[in-house]
Image (cartoon, rainbow, N blue to C red):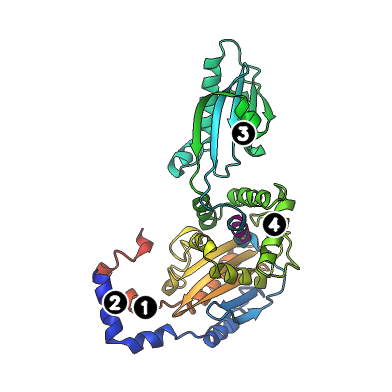
């Protein structure tokens, strides 16, 4: 309540102050700042675009049609594909059963991307725990069969091959040479007798938020493949590539020069242009369906892969930038949104021609942070200047 009273007093007492300050950085000013800084030797001739969301006008561009390595900026496409083809409130269920046949187990899966190899992590983050499935299934198998279980059969549906491999290693270590047999979802139900356990994931939108905030490569790969399957394509890199092309085409974005070898951005063969990414950022900002995607982006100086950025380089920008990082050897990218008074700009900076040293990458990041720090400006600057004892509600950097 105190904050609202202070805000109201400031607005009514000095209305012109807010109008002038909020409009201080117009598109021409933004273009001038970018033009002056992106030629820095520390950015090594990057591909850049800046778009005024209010008008859709390209405020600044440099090499914007040059295909570059996106690194983890590609996860923006993975998340967009997920929200295009999958239900954001969907939960993934995995259950383990004693089989109707002797010495058999059944794992009824749902291609849950959120499964974890760590039981501690699973409990903390509400993940399906593979160790929990393994230990409980082994115990149930022993109880259900009085004789040797050395040679048993595990029927499964809708599990990732990596998870099957992990389970196989577990059973081998415990003296069980299990034969893993893939079956259909219905056959898995028919082969099941007594339930051992069941586990539900959080909603997909929560998983996606974590994926973007912390740039989780495995989750990005698995979720993009699920989107590919829902789009009618294969559950592999080829299907993901087709899906990404369809997503961009659905927004009217030219896909020429787009090359995608994976969904996480780890491949150095991936290529995308700043214009393609910038236009995508503009399009998803206009559609409320993608609001959770934008909400999951790291916030400068506050969350995820941007938590430690801007703190010393551009503290005035803390909390005003939402963006996806992209890091590979010799690459330091950033793409997202920056608040600037009464405007918001979508920006893409693909700096993928750096020297392959951590020093070069750090210098590039610092340059990008300082550049955006000259653009970032709160719409109500008076609130930022409140005394420390009035910041308890708004100072999320202390959380």
Instruction: Read off the residue under disc 4.
Output: 243
Residue in the picture at 53% in, 62% down:
289
Tags 1 and 2 in contact by the CB under 8 Å rule? yes
Of mark 4 and mark 1, the one earlier in the sequence is: 4
Observer-side mark, 4 or 3, equals 4
Q: Which mark is residue 380?
A: 1
The span picked out in magenta is 77-82
Instruction: Read off the residue under disc 3.
Output: 166
Instruction: Read off the residue under disc 2.
Output: 7
Of mark 1 and mark 2, the one earlier in the sequence is: 2
Q: Secondary structure at mark 2?
A: helix
Residue in the picture at 43% in, 42% down:
124
Residue 387 can be seen, yes or no: no
* 246, above or below 180, in the image: below
Tags 4 and 1 in contact by the CB under 8 Å rule? no
Q: Which mark is residue 198?
A: none
Observer-side mark, 4 or 1, equals 4
Quadrant (top left/top right/bottom left/bottom right) for the N terminus: bottom left
* 203, above or below 102, in the image: below
Q: How many other residues sit within 10 Å of disc 1, few (<14), some (14-19) or many (≥20)? A: some
């Amino acid at each position: 309540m105190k904050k609202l009273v202070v805000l109201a007093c400031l607005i009514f007492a000095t209305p012109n102050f807010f109008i002038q300050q909020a409009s201080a950085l117009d598109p021409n000013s933004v273009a001038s700042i970018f033009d002056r800084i992106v030629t820095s030797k520390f950015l090594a001739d990057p591909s850049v675009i800046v778009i005024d969301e209010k008008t859709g006008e390209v405020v600044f561009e440099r090499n914007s049609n040059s295909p570059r390595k996106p690194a983890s900026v590609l996860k923006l496409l993975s998340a967009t594909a997920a929200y295009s083809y999958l239900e954001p409130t969907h939960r993934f269920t995995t259950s383990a059963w004693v089989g109707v046949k002797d010495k058999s187990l059944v794992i009824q899966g749902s291609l849950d991307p959120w499964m974890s190899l760590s039981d501690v992590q699973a409990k903390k983050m509400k993940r399906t725990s593979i160790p929990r499935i393994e230990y409980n299934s082994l115990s149930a198998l022993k109880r259900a069969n009085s004789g040797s279980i050395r040679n048993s059969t595990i029927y499964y549906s809708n599990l990732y091959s990596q998870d099957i491999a992990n389970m196989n290693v577990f059973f081998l270590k415990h003296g069980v040479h299990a034969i893993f047999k893939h079956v259909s979802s219905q056959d898995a139900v028919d082969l099941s007798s007594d339930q051992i356990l069941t586990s539900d994931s959080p909603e997909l939108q929560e998983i996606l938020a974590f994926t973007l905030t912390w740039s989780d490569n495995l989750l990005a790969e698995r979720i993009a493949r699920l989107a590919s399957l829902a789009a009618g394509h294969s559950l592999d890199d080829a299907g993901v590539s087709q899906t990404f092309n369809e997503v961009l085409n659905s927004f009217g974005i030219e896909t020429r020069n787009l090359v995608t070898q994976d969904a996480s951005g780890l491949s150095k063969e991936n290529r995308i242009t700043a214009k393609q990414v910038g236009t995508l950022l503009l399009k998803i900002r206009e559609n409320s369906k993608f609001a959770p995607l934008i909400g999951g982006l790291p916030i400068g100086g506050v969350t995820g892969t941007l938590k430690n950025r801007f703190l010393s380089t551009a503290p005035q920008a803390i909390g005003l930038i939402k963006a996806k990082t992209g890091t590979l050897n010799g690459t330091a990218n950033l793409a997202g949104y920056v608040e600037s008074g009464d405007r918001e700009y979508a920006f893409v900076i693909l700096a993928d021609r750096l020297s392959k040293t951590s020093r070069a990458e750090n210098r590039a990041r610092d340059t990008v942070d300082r550049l955006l720090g000259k653009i970032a400006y709160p719409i109500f600057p008076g609130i930022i200047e409140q005394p420390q004892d009035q910041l308890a509600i708004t100072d999320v950097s202390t959380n």
